[in-house]
Amino acid sequence: MATPAPELGDKLKALLATKGLMSGADLQAREGKARARQSEEKALAAAGGFEVDRVVPGILEGAEDASFYLVREDFPLDCIHGDHTLGAALATDGKHISFSAKDEELSDFDPEKAVFIDTETTGLMGGTGTVTFLVGVGYFHEGHFRLDQCFMRDYDDEEPMLEYLAERFAFADTVVSFNGKSFDLPLLRTRFITNRIPFRVDGIAHFDLVHASRRFWKKRLGDCSLGNIEEQILGIRREGDVDSALIPEIWLSYLHTRDARRLESVFYHHKMDILSLVTLTGFLSHSLSVPDGKGFEHLEDRLSLVRLHFSQKRYDEVLSLAEEMLPLLHEAHLRRDCLEMMGFAAKRRSRWEAMENYWRALIEEFPRHFTARAELAKHLEHRKRDLCEAEQLCRETVKLLEARVSIDVTDSRGVGAPSFLKRLDRIQGKLTRGF
Amino acid sequence: MNVSQVVDRLRRDGDFCRNLTEWKILPDRPARYGGFPEALDPRLVEGLKRRGISNLYTHQTQAVEAALGGENVCVVTPTASGKTLCYNLPVLNGILANPKARALYLFPTKALSQDQVHELKTFVDEIEVKIGTYTFDGDKPASARKAVRSAGHIVVTNPDMLHSGILPHHTIWIRLFENLEYVVIDELHTYRGVFGSHLANVLRRLKRICAFYGSDPTFICCSATIANPGELAARVVERPFHLVDDNGAPSGERHFLFYNPPVVNAELGIRKSSVKEVSRLATHFLSKGIQSIIFARSRLRVEILTTYLKDAVRKLKKDHNLVKGYRGGYLPTERREIERGLRDGSIMAVVSTNALELGIDIGSLDVSIMTGYSGSVASTWQQAGRAGRRSGVSLVILVATSAPLDQYIINHPEYFFEQAPESATVDPNNLIIVTSHMKCASFELPFLDGESFGLGATSTGEILQFLADNRVLRHVRNKWHWSSDTYPAEDVSLRTAAPGNVVILDTTDNGRVIGEVDFFAAPVEVYQNAIYIHQSVQYTIDELDLDDRKAYARPVETDYYTDAQIKVDLKVLDILQQDRVGEVERQSGELSVTWLPTMYKKIKFGTHENVGWGEIHLPESTMHTSSYWLEFPEDCGERFKLPQEELGAALNALANALRQVAPVQVLCDPTDIRAHANLRSPFSDKPSIYLYETYPGGVGFSDKLYTHHERLLEAAVSLLTNCACKEGCPSCIGSALEAGANGKQGALKLAGLALGQSDATPKPSTLNEAV
């Protein structure tokens, strides 16, 4: 091995300054950014020490030489967050939670044994070098909702912080998060593994609100970010929030300037996120507890509820909810979705007469609904044994299908002319054989 | 017609044989067996027997025994010697003994990984046990990746994926790292120079992660024949190795022909075009229904040859799809299709760059034709190995171009057949490379005070401090933490110095990606108005956007291709070694190189005449790198009675000759080293010749050239003296126009001086005269 020269750093500087390593534009942008950042930091440092304890009140938690900064806040149960109180979440019923999450494990969900988790991190790309510098755990505690915001003043705060969190997790039997399954928990797991602390959370149930939210509101809202759900569903307005894209840089530069003022908005942002998890959980459970789907005011959301029942094979609920809302539905695509689910639900429940009516209704409103036509034809041929009508239906359908080539409608289930021709053939055969 | 008949026919063809400088028959070699090692699980032995393998070749036995004994093994394996068993057996044996055990396979390319997984699966099915084998490369959907992590006993990937996709996420690969028993590195010889230096650092990171999880894997490497496989393995993996190089595999009779295209203009030393000669030979084999592979050195030549051959096939009234081109820059699906076509015989001739030199499974071909010397003995044997597998006659033809190195080799067949193949060089401690990987390593796990990363602890500490000064790391208590919101592996490409390739888009086809070139090559290959050829279709480049890494192209039909010219400025920064040979200083050290593409020439297909030119408008680039250089006495011009201009020409001629022979001395790509001559060096005011590395900081080639100064100059002298031309020609000193009338003689005088011969008329070395 060559002995590196003593001025290794200088040599590196020269090598890395190599223009060929990056395009001129890259280099300039990078240098410009660095200069801007440094002058900003200088200004902050000049303004004098603003350590975190002067910005957000908290305590040092842990041993003398191994501690982290803990911001603890107890909220009364009647504290209003948006349109709801935090305490409303205590009425959450495990049955609704497991239904909305499609996860049996959550049927024993008990809000008093849940931890509400959210993290702020040094990057969104993931990977082992990403640090969770602010971890919040919220839980119901002696008639309050308690929020512990655990903050790293520097990298050496991490280990005591994780030790504390491990203790906190030990009391819980469920985690509640928003997108925690794919973001917060993998990052936390990595932090625990690299610090060689057992990560107990892997073994307990996890209610990830992002999936439940998408099930109910994706169709109507499109954007199912927590921010949008707060605004559209929970009636929450944030004031003094920070753009979450800036958060990593705010903490990284605080490490150098020790000026925590910009962190104030990060603590606020983080607190709001967790409080919203609480009211969102309560609101979801409440909405599901109102009979006849009336907890969902918007018909589109209520139809999403029907869809959720359908996907969990709860066909009786599908039929009773849908029967009631069908007359209220006016938009064509909603009626189509609704009738389709009704048809299949009736089929699964062997309610043939009802099923026949739904398929007929579908065909009447949507003559080019080939799935309905196929289902009805099957029914007429095999169950009702009305070969004449079956034959007529198939003939009509083949004609439509042949015309389709030039006009085109898409039929998502890919029912094509060949299958109807085959059916027609068979029925005609039966007819001539005198069945 | 079969190959032996074709060979007989060639032997009686006087016109053909007249141009041969060598007809070597490598006799068939019977197999030698070593038996199954006792420690091998009987289920594996049974499985092998069912596949018709009733014994192991000697090298397989030795490799398996050593690996089972816990030694790191490096196996030297020529093409088709059954190398995969050398690592599959110990790995499977380990998993059968302990179902938790894991193995990691590294192949230089994705294509090789896929082949390997296919073969492993077949074998695993044979022994009827549950062993999961998965490729993990960029192509896998997220859902499938999870299965690889949990169920994959054997994870097959490439160094790039290990570097950017696995190591930075090691916590989700916990099962792999906790139980890692074997790491297999196939095609070790490809990891030389920059790529090898990177791999060594990726492996430093891998070992660091393994240590964290408490595993200590055994390494098994396979290499083609190079001079120093054991040394290379030890340099790349930084562990001691047991070398196994006693190949027991059989091979069929092989005819190895050296073909020098006839001289058409003796005065100028111009020979018939090698491309045309190859195209004629290949067409001949095609017409006889013999499957061949044709190697060419550049992408451009591959395209030109493909075009010629497709035309020839059409004239034979056959489907032009019998002929395909194959090179880097083609899309993966395109490549897979071609590989399949070669195996099932629907493709009869493939024209390839060295991309097909590696162990991609294309079945056994009858004939291998090389258009020009590949630049190294090792890689020439690899390419030759593409023809003929275990039995039957095969034919290899090396067709020389007029390039100096080719002429040297073609006239010294004994050099090729007797000389040991080159040794591979890596420099894992290239500062840029090691620093890049220390960033990645800190992202993976914080460094501890006193920890060392390949370098000594002190140097490691200095680099950590440098990174902390630049706020990439933060030193808190005894640890160095990653402290940035970026993902460092993303900025480090293992294969080039620059982050990100430039993609070439066809603007007439909705911006379809037609290929890519690496960042540094872009100004030379895809500048505005350049002709870029892909699958024989010509495109002209309308715009090169280096910032966005995009080149915009559209198809055109022209009868020329383009060739860029580059202006270079050098500055010596530091001298690390120096020595005096007679009156000449030889030195090595660090340079700053500035280069600027200035213009391009349009060169006509077929006649290769210059039909025009244009300017290139691109910014200049600067780079720090390593170099080896010679400084001649200030009065040497007067002494040799060479006026300034002619001295300049002589320096250029010698620089060019040295550059031509340099890759033979240090196993590197011709593009890894460039040469430059200065009439008056701005550093010393003396006439100078520089050979410098194209990778920032250099990866050890300069040092090697410095050490082999004498051998290098002798090779250059031999090249010049053995060339039949009078005043220098493209075959020895490059363009005769630029070298002037006395270029060649002047170059010889300078070379003599550099060899310490006072009378300055170098004696031809002991090498034979040209045939």
Image (cartoon, grey):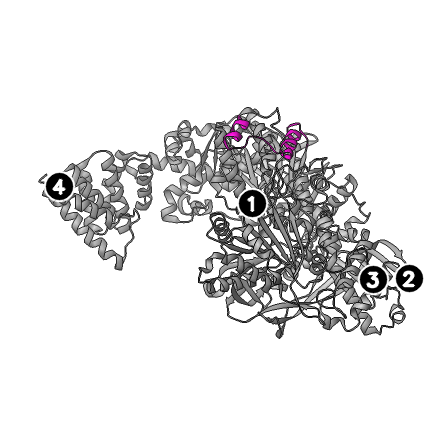
**Chain of the residue on which disc 1 is drawn:** B
**Residue that label 3 marks:** B751
Q: Are marks 1 and 3 in contact (CB under 8 Å)?
A: no
Q: CA distance from mark 4 to mark 3?
A: 100 Å
**Magenta-drawn stretch, dominant element (helix, strand or loop):** helix
Q: Is residue B328 visible?
A: no
Q: Quadrant of the N terminus of chain A?
A: top right
Q: Residues within 10 Å of mark 1 (few under 14, many from 20)?
A: some
Q: Which mark is residue B758?
A: 2
The residue under the point 24% across, 40% down is A342
Question: In this view of the protein, which residue sits in the foreground, B567 or B533?
Answer: B533
Q: CA distance from mark 1 to mark 3?
A: 47 Å
Circle 4 — which element?
helix
**Chain of the residue on which disc 3 is drawn:** B
Q: CA distance from mark 1 to mark 4?
A: 66 Å
**Residue that label 4 marks:** A430
Q: Is residue B459 visible?
A: yes
**Chain of the residue on which disc 4 is drawn:** A
Mark closer to the chain start, 1 or 3: 1
**Residue that label 1 marks:** B392
Left or right, B704 with respect to A238, comes to right
Q: Are marks 3 and 2 in contact (CB under 8 Å)?
A: no
The residue under the point 24% across, 49% down is A418
**Chain of the residue on which disc 2 is drawn:** B
